[in-house]
Image (cartoon, helix red, strand yellow):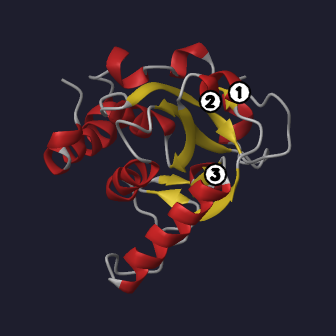
């Protein structure tokens, strides 16, 4: 479990996001300036200590999520969300591509009233500007207990870049991030 007091005492903040498979989000945020660490895991459901197999069945209420520790002096929460909205489809309810179920929902789990306000403001702007062709269904909800996923899920893309899902799903999202947000890539 991440100790938020320790993170705050170091001048860092947490962001927890769900946007389909956590491998995609982790691969992108691992390369973003200002993001110190990324953990894949589960949030949003009532079952304590869920396993991947349980979450995949869609019965725990959890979403596959990533929890970032980031330096707000280097990257803002809004910038993190701008990347988030660019690399997944926030208009499909409980689905990302062929991944279907509540565990693949789009969600921003906020850790402070400020994060909630930023998320709601950005969603309102994207909606007003009709950035997407369909309504945004991303839930904005308070962060609950984050359960770190099993070890084999951590740094999955980095360890398995030639695995078919990584080649056809994660790789293109990472390429989109690199092209669209080149100035935000770690040196």
Across and down, in percent, residue 129 comes to 32, 83
Q: Secondary structure at mark 3?
A: strand
Which numbered marker is on residue 8?
Answer: 2
131 and 71: which one is in front?
A: 71
Q: Quadrant of residue 156?
A: top left
Disc 1 target residue: 5
Q: Which residue is at a point 39% across and 85% down the rendered structure image?
A: 128
Across and down, in percent, residue 28 comes to 34, 36
Distance Cα–Cα, label 1 vs label 3: 16 Å
Locate the C terminus and report the quarter of the image it occupies: top left
- Vertical comparison of 59 with 28: above or below: below
70 and 41: which one is in front?
A: 70
Which numbered marker is on residue 110?
Answer: 3
94 and 185: which one is in front?
A: 185
58 and 26: which one is in front?
A: 26
- C-beta proximity under 8 Å, tags 2 and 1: yes
Residue 81 shows up from this direction = yes
Q: Earlier in the sequence, mark 1 or mark 3?
A: 1
């Amino acid at each position: 479990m991440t100790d938020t007091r320790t993170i705050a005492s170091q001048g860092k903040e947490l962001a927890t996001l769900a946007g389909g498979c956590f491998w995609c989000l982790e691969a992108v945020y691992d390369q973003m300036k200002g993001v110190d660490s990324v953990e894949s895991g589960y949030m949003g459901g009532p079952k304590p200590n869920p396993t991947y197999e349980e979450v995949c069945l869609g019965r725990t209420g959890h979403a596959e999520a990533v929890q970032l520790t980031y330096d707000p002096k280097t990257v803002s929460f809004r910038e993190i969300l701008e990347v988030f909205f660019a690399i997944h489809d926030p208009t499909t309810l409980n689905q990302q591509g062929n991944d279907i179920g509540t565990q693949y929902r789009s969600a921003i789990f906020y850790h402070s009233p400020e994060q909630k306000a930023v998320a709601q403001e950005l969603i309102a702007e994207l909606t007003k500007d009709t950035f997407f062709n369909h309504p945004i269904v991303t839930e904005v909800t308070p962060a609950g207990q984050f359960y770190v996923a099993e070890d084999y899920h951590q740094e999955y893309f980095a360890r398995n870049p030639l695995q078919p899902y990584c080649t056809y799903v994660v790789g293109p999202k990472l390429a989109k991030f690199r092209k669209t947000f080149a100035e935000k890539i770690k040196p």
